[in-house]
Amino acid sequence: MRVSSTADRRRIKRRFIDAALWLAASVPPVAGVTGAHAQTTDLGTVQTSDSASDVNSAVYQAPTTTPLTVTQPTSVIDKHYIENNIPQTANFDKVISVAPSVMVQPSGKGGDDATISIRGFQNGQFNVTLDGIPMRSYSQTNRSGTFIMTNDLGQVSVDRGPGTASNVGDATFGGTVALQTKSPMSTSAITATTSYGSFNTQLYGLQLDSGKIASTNGASLFLDTQFTKSDGYYTNTAKERENAALKFVQPLSDNTTLTFVSIYNNETRNYFSGASLAQIAAYGPNYGLSSSPNQQNYAGYNFWNIKTDFDYLGLQSDFGDGWHLENKVYTYGYYQAPYLVGADVSGNSGLGTVLGVNDVPGNSGPVNYRSYGDVIAIAKELPDGAVKMGAWAEHQPSYRGWFNVDMTLAQKYISTNFSQNLALDTVQPYVEGDWKPLPGLTITTGAKYAYVKRSYDSLVDPNTHGPLDYSQTWAKALPSLAANYKLSPNWSVYAQAAEGFLTPPAALPGSANVQPQTTWNYQVGTSYQSQSFTLAGDVYYIDFQNMIASRSIGGVTNYFNQGGVTYKGIELEGTVHVGNGFSVFGNGSLNSAKSVQTGQWIAQAPNATLAAGLIYEQGNWHASLTDKWVGSRFGDVGQKQPLSPFNQLDMAVTYKVKNPLPNLAAVTAKFGISNILDSRTIVDFGGYSGKLLTPLFYTQIGRNIYSSLTVQF
């Protein structure tokens, strides 16, 4: 419901206070904490107890943990989990799929653009950062899966909330997926990896680590190169990917460090838009693309190449007297060669173009953008807290086009649907303060000012179908208030309220005068960590106004105003270390995301999620069995295209031997099975195709295995 009166607001506030007390009461108090149970350092978003380094502890083994210092629901997934449970060929979506309220449809267009939902928020409605740098395109959606591979990640955090004022980026109200690159090793090493699995999936990798170089004041770096290829689960959906990542860390003094990161990707693959129910029934759940050049879903007509790069130079310094500075100057680019797609991949529309009655019609769509930006943060510690100020500023020129072509005649040009040069300019200055009025209590309040300017220089505008040159500007102050209270060194409670903001999509007409999307987020929660178990939970309520929904028709996304939406739910996660190397974990959520006007569910919003598993680590062995279940949802707005619940059961086994030979530092063998139960249900809706608006779907990727061998010298 929408909060429309003082009485309504008081009732909601009372509900959240009651929920906070219930959550706090559900965690057992600790009479005394000593030794390994005591928290020694406030480490922010990383593990926050000494148990974090103890292999025989719940904190160390937990797939997701909620740090004791947070002011919003947070699931931190560390390098230990990534290395032992995630195939190196996967993307970050596979990593975060274990978190509560997160849905990842294991399909996606070609496999690297999986559909992600967090509490029902879709791509473009939550923030994604890489080393604290917001990642987005001109449409304010993100393609982060094409920038970095899991082998170069050191940690992933799923923050299910807007954060405080210092959390910069688009659509922070939907949460932030914070990706962090791994650090260089402290010792020099050469690491070679090879991997092979189902669908002829191959990976070859080589990483060089310098270790700390004494002659350069302890500088260190790693260079990681990888090549992957696969025939794909869906028929005729092959892909190849090259990746290189460099990270260089140079201490300039005891208090100042310079960091340089550069990542490059080149990916070529077939573009799979989904299959119709008739195609799935006729050819099987793994039907993808055709091998016949007389069909619109021919593999040779549905194809793309993507090149991306990401670079930044970061400076982190402690000036003394409580002053701290962090600054990152960056650029990243996304270059998509004119990708090709058949006009109607369902095959329900006939052949023929203006150039030939039997020719195959199709579309070609180039996209490219480059961002130039800076993220700066300054903090001053005070006797009773701290003051922080900073800003994010970015300029992003881009181009996008959509052309009708004749596939039979080597993609010969027919006409233009749109051809646009765009620019997206964003500035987000902020100021916030931490106040510690009582021992263990930290209150954080602040505000950021979000300014966005979008400029268009269209040769052919998609709405007017002619030249058009205009710009639009939006701005809003976004306040936030949060608190964290340490009830003991192992137990904390928190609460948060914040306003969110998102501009209308880039594809809306300039004359539409559409108001920005706004939210108010309210949530309370608690986190407990000890040697034997971890437990965290929260409840949330989000009032979303002026939501812009979308529907994909023939590869083109159409937008419309869905009005107000209410998001609310409860989330729990925990891990128990039972001894003898065994741990069990579980997490789950009950979620609701419904239109205020109609009471209907919004698209791609599951009503619940559940994950559970068993972990074993002893000596050289690590093994896990993980099951993730996602509840029912609708693929399209208006509760159309209902999708049934699905689950995925995975296992992974790792065997690592250190120093097996004099010149060999370590040998690691991994084996895993994804989707052990071989579920192939329909899990995602891909939009509509052709003049008949034929629905397209993705099925769950069937049972598959992977194996790898890593040798470190």
Image (tube, helix red, strand yellow):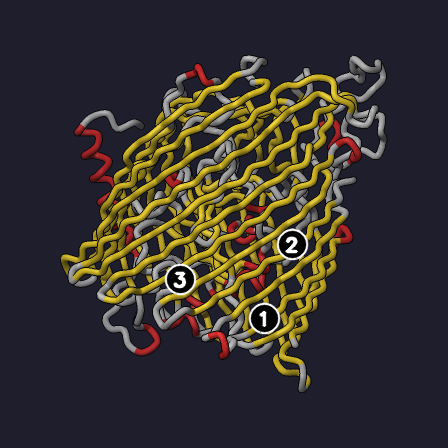
Q: Compared to 388, does 418 lie above or below?
A: above
Q: CA distance from mark 3 to mark 1?
A: 24 Å
Q: Quadrant of residue 11?
A: top left
Q: Compare residues 591 and 140 and report the one nearer the observer.
A: 140
Disc 1 target residue: 209
Above/below status of 234 relative to 228: above
Residue position for label 3? 46
Disc 3 residue crowd, few under 14, some 14–19, many 20+, Cα 10 Å: some
Quarter where residue 480 is shown: top left
Report if residue 138 is visible in the image.
yes
Query: Label 2 amino acid?
Result: Asn
Q: Nearer the viewer, residue 448 or 125?
A: 448
Tell me the quadrant of the picture where the N terminus can be found.
Answer: top left
Identify residue type, mark 3.
Answer: Val
Q: Residue furthest left?
A: 437
> Given the image, on which type of amino acid does mark 1 rest?
Asp
Query: Disc 1 on helix, strand or loop?
Result: strand
**Which of pointers 3 and 1 lies earlier in the amino acid sequence?**
3
Q: Identify the secondary structure beneath mark 3.
A: loop
Q: Which residue is mark 2?
A: 243
